Amino acid sequence: MDKRLEKIENYIRQYHMIEKGDRIVIGVSGGADSVCLLMALCSLQEKLGFQVLVCHVNHELRGEEAAQDEAYVEMLCHKMQVPFFAFHENVELIAKKRKESLEEAGRYVRRQAFEQLCKEQGGTKIATAHHSNDNAETMLLNMARGTGLRGLCGIRPVYGKWIRPLLKLSREEIEQWLKDCDIRYCVDETNQEDEYTRNRIRHHVIPTLEEQVNTRTVEHFVKLSEQAEEIYEYLEKQTDQAWNICAKQTDGLQSRKEIFLKAEEMKHLDPVIKKLLIQRSVSEVAGAQKDIESRHILAVLQLFERQTGRQIDLPYSVTAKRMYEGVLLAKGDKKVTSVHQKEKRKEESNFVLQLQIPGETQIPGTNLKICCTISGENEKNSAKEIPQKSYTKCFDYDIIKSSLCVRYRRPGDYFTIDGEGKKKKLKSYFIDEKIPQEERDRQLLIAEESHIVWIPGRRMSSYYQVGDQTKKILKIKIMEE
């Protein structure tokens, strides 16, 4: 076996890239790298027990040259008895629509084509022809633009169903191998130009480093990327653990994802894990990772030290807001959200439902029902044993002068906090208990006019407590159906 093919096989096995029975979509442009990848995987498919399909994307940028490349790849696939599929995309038009460079738009259409073919043909993996020089270029590009540890990892050998079997080979090894096997390939003249940033790194930066610093520059970059990958994987596991402890994920307004980061739990995290957790959380809410920079992560981190109510704007319409117990990350149009919240509060302020005593009261739009029963003074002892935060409470029914209702908060609400009749505004109680604004609006209340009889799950008014003079006991129980 050729030593270069052996190197590829060992690399595939090292990262468990391919399993028996896989159907692998290979992106083949016709250039040296992708032709080498096709040749290598065709040589290994019987031994490792997988199938290959070829996907060629014509970007419609080079006219007749592009047509010739497509014809060559189709001929090569016919010769190797490999299924061939071609996609035609107007990359220039797509770049304008997406407001991207041709390079970025090209990557986008290739990815879309590979994913589509994978779906249509039952593909299980997607193989691309990135090699060690590509990896070094990516690392330099990331460092020049500003990157963290993730950027030092360069191109990952395996990322989901995407695999890069050639990452151990250099460009020189690939071209020499094709020459030894007398296999020709297409040359894209645009790759020789310096219009693209990556080409300038390829033609000027790396050759300078190899000639004037160290001839093994690319090899050393590859080793650094492997070390960074190992460290990053360890930190990812630590971040997973931190996520389970510090992050709470919910669906907010209009089913938008929201993530709440708990301040007290975040205090105990190592600074590195803290930043990684924030980065992951912002990315989750945003639905994207690009453009989320270290300055955004730092801004969220500083928000934990600010007063309640402070808010910052992040990319992709994500906002971070300081709450009593942490920071809430949410996404959405602020104006739409604000209107939605006002309408919702208006509906809640108008919601009043009289309790059936005795009997059951179903709360519309929920799976909750309130069960009310009346008993004699023989229940006094058991009434006093009910825990403070229980969803079952007993009250002195003789004291209640008018009907009880279930509703949300209103201006002027109050309750009695001790046996001497001292009163406290509900608003002040919420502030003192550091209950977030959103929870205050959703808190159901049992009330007698403006006097709050019970804040379910929190506390009851002392005025209605069962005492020595109580003759009739009202037992209220909130249940889920």
Image (cartoon, rainbow, N blue to C red):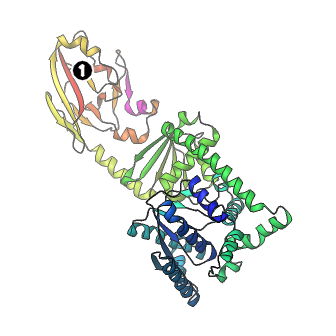
Residue 445 in the image: x percent, y percent? 29, 33
Residue shown at 63%/75% (left/top)?
A: 32
Residue 195 vs residue 87, the one in the foreground? 87
Q: Answer whether residue 439 is visible to the viewer in this image.
A: yes
Residue farthest to the left? 358
Residue farthest to the bottom? 64
Q: Is residue 260 magenta?
A: no
Q: Which residues are magenta?
A: 422-430
Q: Quadrant of the C terminus?
A: top left
- Is 475 on the left or on the right of 268, as rendered? left
Q: Answer whether residue 99 is visible to the viewer in this image.
A: no
Q: Is residue 426 magenta?
A: yes
Placement of 313 over or under 134, stated as above or below: above
Residue position for label 1: 395
Q: Amino acid at mark 1?
A: Phe
Residue 293 in the image: x percent, y percent? 62, 55
Find residue 307 and report its image quarter: top right
- Give the structural element (helix, strand or loop) at label 1: strand
Q: How many discs mark residues in the rendered view?
A: 1
Residue shown at 36%/41% (left/top)?
A: 441
Residue 473 in the image: x percent, y percent? 19, 18
